Image: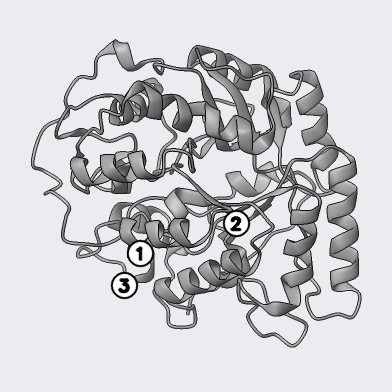
Amino acid sequence: MSTVTVVIVNRPFNLLLRFGIALTACRGPGSGARGRSPDAQAPTAVSPQYDRPAFPVIDVHTHFDPEATPRIVATLDARNVRYAVNLSGGWPGHGLEEALAQARVTHGRIVPFCMLDWRGVGRPDFVENALATLDRCARLGVRGWKIAKNLGLGVTDTAGARVAVDDPRLDPLFARAGSLGMVVLIHSGDPRAFFEPPGPSNERNDELRAHPGWSFADPVYPRWSELLGEFERRVARHPGTRFIGAHFGNAAEDPDRVSRLLAQCPNYYIDTAARIPEMGRHPAAQMRRFFERWEDRIVFGTDLGMGVEPEATMLGSTGETPPGPEDITRFWRATFRYFESNDRQFEHPTPIQGRWRIDGLGLSPRVLRKVYGENAARLLNLTEFSSP
């Protein structure tokens, strides 16, 4: 029987590099019958015109080591990323101070979100202490709160019971985040294929073979749809709190379900991080309509992770070997190509997330400006951002 292990360290970016733990498991598409054969086509060259996006970008979903700041800034400059949200900000005494220092050194260009320590749910003082942490983070200028997938999959209370994403004991925390003006970004669950038995018939078997700890097929875990239901109830319960559903609302396999929650909850946004492989499997016309309908509620994200050394790089997912220069070039070119071109059947940014081809959306300049940066600038009050 597999288990979810949460490692507490002083530098939250170390959690990202220890890819076997629940806080940072891989992202990507889930199961379904829409995918193409892994061997359907050979790799194709991508035009250098997609090395940079058509308009400036705000990346709302990254994981950065503060000690890697010069390397990170060089990468952001090369790709016209004006701001990046560091979701590995930690909490006071556990990495937040370093993340805030990184923000100052970059003149606010890297925006840290804070996290909470979930140990002790069920203790009489847990909520009081967690509220005090959120208050302190807000006073320090933190704009958002990141909740990793260990809530729902690994966090237990003092009695040893699983803490659901919509556990009512946590209601005061989400209400407080709203009153403080903090955006709450939640990663709930994982790709649907990670909840199915690993093996040759699992379309994400490349990742699961390399990282068996990313499998949640064991029935000890809640099912994919159960976690989504908890997440959706959480968002709907707090209309005064602004939420971002990570990874295309945690359900890129089912855009209609994502659309229903967007329609129900005006306080709800979604990011695109590490879900281009799955989004690109849906018919391009369907996804273009989705982006046009929700053009004001979608924000750009990559799930880019960067440490001090080049090998400490995550491009939405990782394989058995670190990504090389060709992998990094493909990641960025295929990302911008998906949003900007009408190209068909090209290699997506992270092939380990599924050996199929995707179709580009060819979004209009108006929609691109909003998705790439304007929506995030409004949501995070980044008044200095402009999208010519």
Do the CB atoms of the residues marked 1 and 2 lie less than 8 Å apart? no
Camera-nearest label, 1 or 2: 1
Mark 3 lies on residue: 197
Dot 1 amino acid type: Arg
| Label located before the other in sequence (1 or 2) | 2
Compared to residue 15, the image places residue 63 above or below, namely above
Q: How many marks?
A: 3
| Label located before the other in sequence (2 or 3) | 2
Q: Residue furthest left?
A: 40
Residue 84, horizontal then vertical, whole percent: 61, 29
* Left or right placement of residue 171 versus residue 235 in this view: right
Mark 1 lies on residue: 192
Dot 3 amino acid type: Pro
Mark 2 lies on residue: 23
Q: Which of 22 and 323 lies nearest the eye of the viewer?
A: 22
Do the CB atoms of the residues marked 2 and 3 lie less than 8 Å apart? no
Report the residue at 29% width, 31% height from top. Answer: 338
The crowd level at tag 3 (other Cα within 10 Å; few <14, some 14-19, many 20+) is some
The crowd level at tag 1 (other Cα within 10 Å; few <14, some 14-19, many 20+) is many
Q: Quadrant of residue 17?
A: top right
